[in-house]
Image (cartoon, coloured by chain):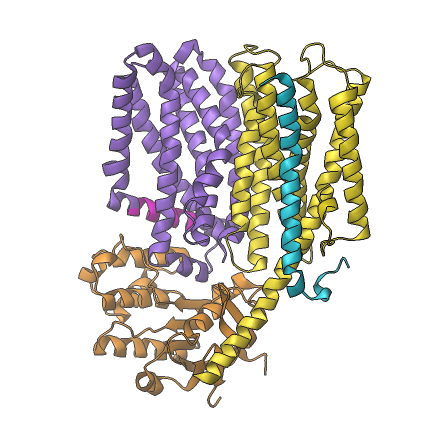
Chain colours: A yellow, B purple, C orange, D cyan
């Protein structure tokens, strides 16, 4: 949706991404109408269920992004060409995933304040999300370590595969930790709600809208990263030329 | 094939005994880390002044201390390699990185288990925790597998933070969220062994299973990933 | 002719950060040569040696060491070269003897070979029992060279091997390097002391500004 | 805060960071665009 604000088209735009962006904007508007106006309040949760229409899709997209990062990383490592573009896709996807995961944490705790009366519960989903948020911040830090593009790609691909292995382990351990201790001290700790048809449709529609936004963001970010990598390679020419002229003058 | 596996284990043994020897010479563990951990245990006893609470926090305290100690120990383990660029010499010597990795993990496990043994012993005395024979078996297994899980990941991320020079802050950022399952599992299993909060010993074994899975997964992953990650 | 080259570096660009420490360097070295790489500080001598040891990534160009591609077959390159940089690569808390026996274990050398290397570099029992941190610069260098001798590398790359040594120590090193060549190895040393190395080396490679400006007779 | 405020804040916080990220990315794209050859942009 933000591309609409730009008067000069960004150099990463193509017809396909433009249509994808328009689709994302239209979807967001429809989602807002559905989620904020047309759906009824939940029997148990009241109006706080309206947070769910953004909270659940962002959480879904964050996990999707991390799995996509892992898939691209595996493709980079085991592909014949060791494609750098797959590495950039992995990086773009992880960045977007971290943003959505941060959003998930914030909206989750706002929802928790309404439903549980407290911003933070050691709920398995919230706890897992918090751990993974930090993990992928670490992954992005690894991407920024420097070195050549090949080094960056190999290093971050391996870390991405480690990180994706952590998802089930962290989640599983937190779930059984919570199930053994402190049972049902909060109201509906897992956030499940009984939904009517329109509510369920809005939720699924929200997932579709945010997945579109994700695809749109990753495509654009991937192109900027490609331009940055190309610029870095061109920088070598400049540096070589500089070194040569310095040699002549000295 | 088996010759190269034997060779890898030979290298692992050489690296592990070298690391432990360096650690024994420097005495940082015995002269600095252990006394610090012990004084924290004692201060906790003053601060909480309640046997019931102390028995409840003892398992968590032991594993939190182990986790933070692992950061220091693994950083030292790789600082030794970096001090005089021995890591370059190891790379150039064509030494199998799997061997270096397994050696590092083994040395880390030995140090962490020694550290946990002292802390658990202190908890028994200071916090009046009771452990029966079955509980002792559980406790020993937990310490071994918990340390293995921490060490398997710490060695990988420690190697990575050495490769990207001057990025020491990277290690805790990567390691701490990743070893959360170990912290949870080992603490619960230790609670069962200590009988804290009415926990029974048999309740601890499923957690040991989690620790075993974690250790196996990351030991395998680390063996494959350590070489490419530290290869600069 | 490319097949007989132990070192075949073409148009190599190596970046340290964004600085091209090697700017399209071309080097050929044949088997059995004893070559000195000469040039002012910051010219790229160390980078050239580290590249050949498989310790630095190549940004452009190509490099084959012992016939192996430096990027695709890095581990094979590393297994066949011996490298001694500015640092000695020793464990400072261990004694010289413990360092030597560690490397002996790691590279699969037997006890006799380790002892022979120590004797060759004039390390007596007292020095072998001293922690490396308490050795003098020259004694550390000799320990590192003894480690080099334990490795049976086909290509020896040494960065300023004479640094910090007295006259006797330098002669020992020269003898060690000549022995290595006689035994079939190829030796490349970086040095800025031309007179010393000229008597030792069969050829001189001149590096200036990240490029090779003279390769001498081959 | 009332229920309605929580909901509005949640929706704003869901779309806001996304828009900021996209804006920053577009700005970066425009900034480096003149420095990159057309040949390095396979999508055009």
Identity of the residue drawn at 59% across and 23% down: A110
- Tell me which secondary structure the magenta stretch mostly adopts: helix
Image quadrant in which you'd find residue C166: bottom left
Query: Residue C78: x percent and y percent?
Result: 48, 64
> Residue B13 in magenta?
yes
Is residue A36 visible in the rendered image? The answer is yes
Q: Give the total number of marks visible in the rendering.
A: 0
Question: Which segment did they paint magenta?
Answer: B9-22
Query: Residue C211: x percent and y percent?
Result: 49, 79
> Residue A26 in magenta?
no
Question: C192 above or below A233?
Answer: below
- Of C76 and A64, which appears nearest the observer? A64
Identity of the residue drawn at 53% across and 21% down: A120
Asked if residue A63 lies left or right of residue A249, the reply is: right
- Residue, far front: A7
Image quadrant in which you'd find residue C35: bottom left
Question: A54 above or below C170?
Answer: above
- Residue, far left: C126
Asked if residue C146 lies left or right of residue A149, the reply is: left
Question: C208 above or below A62?
Answer: below
Query: Residue B184: x percent and y percent?
Result: 47, 25
Is residue C30 visible in the rendered image? The answer is no
Identity of the residue drawn at 49% across and 58% down: B232
- Of B79 and C73, which appears nearest the observer? B79
Query: Residue A25: x percent and y percent?
Result: 77, 38
């Amino acid at each position: 949706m933000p591309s609409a604000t730009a008067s000069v088209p960004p150099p990463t735009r193509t017809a396909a991404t433009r249509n994808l962006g328009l689709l994302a904007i239209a979807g967001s508007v429809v989602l807002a109408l559905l989620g904020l106006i047309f759906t009824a309040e939940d029997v148990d949760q009241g109006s706080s269920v309206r947070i769910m229409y953004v909270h659940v899709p962002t959480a879904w997209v964050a996990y999707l992004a991390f799995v996509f990062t892992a898939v691209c990383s595996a493709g980079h490592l085991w592909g014949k060409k060791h494609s750098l573009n797959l590495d950039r896709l992995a990086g773009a996807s992880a960045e977007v995933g971290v943003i959505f995961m941060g959003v998930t944490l914030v909206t989750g705790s706002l929802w928790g304040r309404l439903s549980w009366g407290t911003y933070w519960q050691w709920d398995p989903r919230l706890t897992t999300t918090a751990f993974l948020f930090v993990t992928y911040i670490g992954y992005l830090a690894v991407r920024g370590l420097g070195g050549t593009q090949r080094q960056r790609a190999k290093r971050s691909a391996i870390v991405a595969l480690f990180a994706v292995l952590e998802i089930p382990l962290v989640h599983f351990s937190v779930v059984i930790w919570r199930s053994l201790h402190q049972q049902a001290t909060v109201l509906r700790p897992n956030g499940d709600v009984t939904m009517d048809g329109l509510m369920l449709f809005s939720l699924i529609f929200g997932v579709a809208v945010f997945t579109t936004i994700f695809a749109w963001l990753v495509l654009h970010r991937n192109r900027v990263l490609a331009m940055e990598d190309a610029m870095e390679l061109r920088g070598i020419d400049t540096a070589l030329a500089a070194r040569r002229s310095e040699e002549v003058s000295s | 094939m088996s010759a190269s596996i034997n060779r890898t284990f030979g290298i692992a043994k050489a690296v592990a005994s070298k690391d432990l020897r360096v650690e024994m010479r420097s005495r940082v563990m015995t002269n600095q880390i252990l006394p610090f951990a012990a004084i924290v245990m004692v201060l906790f006893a003053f601060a909480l002044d309640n046997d019931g609470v102390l028995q409840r926090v003892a398992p968590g305290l032991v594993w939190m201390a182990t986790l933070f100690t692992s950061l220091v120990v693994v950083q030292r383990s790789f600082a030794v390699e970096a001090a005089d660029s021995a890591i370059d010499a190891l790379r150039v010597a064509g030494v199998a990185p799997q061997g270096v990795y397994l050696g590092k993990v083994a040395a880390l496990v030995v140090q962490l288990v020694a550290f946990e043994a002292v802390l658990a012993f202190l908890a028994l005395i200071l916090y009046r925790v009771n452990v029966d024979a079955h509980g002792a078996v559980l406790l020993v297994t937990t310490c071994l597998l918990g340390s293995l899980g921490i060490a398997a990941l710490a060695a990988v991320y420690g190697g990575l933070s050495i490769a990207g020079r001057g990025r020491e802050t990277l290690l805790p950022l990567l390691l701490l969220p990743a070893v959360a399952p170990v912290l949870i599992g080992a603490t619960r299993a230790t609670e069962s062994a200590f009988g804290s909060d009415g926990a029974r010993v048999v309740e601890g074994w499923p957690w040991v299973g989690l620790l075993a899975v974690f250790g196996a997964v990351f030991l395998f992953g680390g063996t494959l990933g350590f070489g490419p990650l530290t290869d600069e | 002719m490319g097949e007989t080259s132990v070192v075949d570096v073409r148009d190599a660009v190596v970046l340290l950060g964004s600085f091209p420490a090697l700017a399209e360097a071309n080097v050929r070295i044949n088997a059995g040569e004893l070559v000195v790489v000469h040039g002012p500080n910051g010219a790229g001598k160390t980078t050239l040696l580290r590249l050949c040891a498989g310790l630095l990534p190549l940004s452009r160009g190509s490099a084959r060491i012992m016939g192996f591609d430096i990027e695709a077959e890095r581990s094979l390159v590393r297994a066949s070269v011996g490298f001694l940089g500015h640092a000695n690569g020793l464990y400072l808390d261990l004694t010289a003897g413990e360092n030597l026996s560690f490397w002996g274990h790691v590279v699969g050398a037997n006890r006799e070979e380790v002892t022979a290397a120590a004797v060759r570099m004039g390390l007596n029992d007292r020095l072998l029992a001293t922690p490396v941190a308490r050795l003098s610069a020259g004694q550390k260098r000799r320990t590192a060279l003894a480690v080099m001798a334990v490795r049976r590398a086909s290509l020896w790359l040494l960065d300023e091997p004479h640094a910090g040594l007295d006259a006797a120590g330098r002669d020992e090193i020269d003898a060690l390097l000549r022995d290595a060549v006689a035994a079939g190895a190829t030796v490349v040393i970086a040095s800025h002391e031309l007179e010393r190395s000229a008597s030792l080396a069969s050829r001189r490679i001149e590096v200036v500004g990240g490029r090779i400006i003279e390769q001498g007779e081959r | 805060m009332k229920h309605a405020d929580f909901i509005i804040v949640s929706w704003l916080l869901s779309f806001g960071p996304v828009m900021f990220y996209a804006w920053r990315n577009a700005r970066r794209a425009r900034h480096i665009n003149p420095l990159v050859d057309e040949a390095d942009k396979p999508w055009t």
